[in-house]
Amino acid sequence: MGETALEAVLRRDRAVVAAALVVIAVLAWAYVVWLSTDMVMSGARVSDSAAGGMAGMDMSNLDMGSMDMGAALAPGFRAWASADFVFIFTMWAVMMVGMMTPSVAPMLLLYAGVGRKALADGRPVASTAWFFTGYLIVWVVFSIVATGAQWLLARFALLNPAMATGSAVVGGLVLIAAGLYQWTPIKGVCLRQCQAPIAFLASHGGFRTTAPGALRLGMDHGAYCLGCCWALMALLFVGGVMNLLWIAGIAFLVLLEKVVPTGQLIPRVSGALMVAVGVFLIFPAL
C-alpha cells in the first residue's frame, strides 16, 4: 500500500472512531438531559400538588411509590428499593460515559491510528473497542461506588430533592477535600499519564495484540483517569447530581486538565478556588 493510500486509510479510521465517540457522548448526554428535565418537572408537579391540597390532604392515603424517581429518592420520602439502586447506578454509569468520553478521545484516536498502521505492516493489534471497553469498566465500577455513596447520603438525610447536599458544612468540606486533592502528588502522577497518551503506552509496554491484553491496558488507563478525576466527581453531590450546568462544568474542567498543555496549572488553580469556596461556605462570616 502506498504512503498516500495509507495516510488516507488512517484518516478514515480516525474519523470513524471520532464519529463513534461523538455518537456515544451525545447519546449519553441526551439521556442525562432527559433525566434532569424529567426530575425538575416531577419536582414541580409535586410542589404544585402540595401547595394546592396539602391543607386538607389525608397523608395516610398518599402512595409515595407512585411519585417520579427524582422526588421519591429525596430524603424523607421513602427507602430505596432494588429498582432504585438499578436506576441510580444506570444514571451514574451513563453520566460517566458522557463526561469522560471527550477527555479520552485523544488516546483512542492515537490507538486507532497506530492500530491501522500496525495492521498494514503485518503486526495487527487488538481493536480500539477493547481498549475503550476496559476504560469504561473502571468508570462502571466507580458508578457502583457512587451509587452506594448517594444511598448513604440519602439515608442520613444529607441530600435534598435536587440530589445535592443540603448542608453548607458538608458541601464546604467536600469542596475543600477536592481542592486539596488537586495539589497532591498522586493527582499529578495520574494527570501526567492522562495528558500524554504516548508516554502512557511507552510505560506500559505499548499496544496489545490480544483482546484481553487491550482490555487490561484500557483498564490501566481508566485507573489513572479515575485517580485523576474521582474527587471532581464527588463535587456532583455539592452542586447537584442532576444539575446540568454543574455536570457540564465539571466535564469541561476534566477536559481542560487533560488536553490543555499547562501541566498542573489548571488543577492547582481550580483546587485553590475550591478550597476558598469551601471555606466561605463553612465560615460565611469570614
Image (cartoon, rainbow, N blue to C red):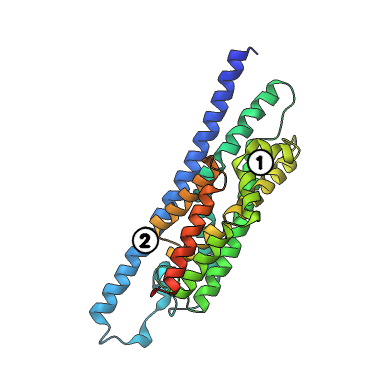
- Please indicate, yes or no, whether residue 81 appears anywhere in the rendered image: no
Q: From what the image shows, is residue 232 above or below residue 27?
A: below
- Please indicate, yes or no, whether residue 57 appears anywhere in the rendered image: yes
Secondary structure at numbered mark 2: helix
Percent x, y of residue 146: 56, 64
Percent x, y of residue 141: 63, 58
76 or 197: nearer the eye?
197
Q: Residue at x 48, y 76 (%)?
A: 158
Q: Residue at x 64, y 26 (%)?
A: 116
Q: Amino acid at mark 1?
A: Trp
Q: Residue at x 66, y 29 (%)?
A: 115
Q: From what the image shows, is residue 112 above or below residue 136?
A: above
Q: How many angstroms separate mark 2 from mark 1 (CA)?
A: 34 Å
Label 1 belongs to which residue?
130
Q: Amino acid at mark 2?
A: Asp
Percent x, y of residue 84: 51, 68
User: Image check: 239 left or right of 151?
Assistant: left
Q: Residue at x 63, y 47 (%)?
A: 135
First in sequence, mark 2 or 1: give its number: 2
Q: In which image quadrant can residue 13 be found?
A: top right
Label 2 belongs to which residue?
38
Quadrant where the N terminus is found in the figure: top right
Secondary structure at numbered mark 1: helix
Label 2 neighbour load within 10 Å: few <14, some 14-19, many 20+: some
Quadrant where the C terminus is found in the figure: bottom left
61 or 49: nearer the eye?
49
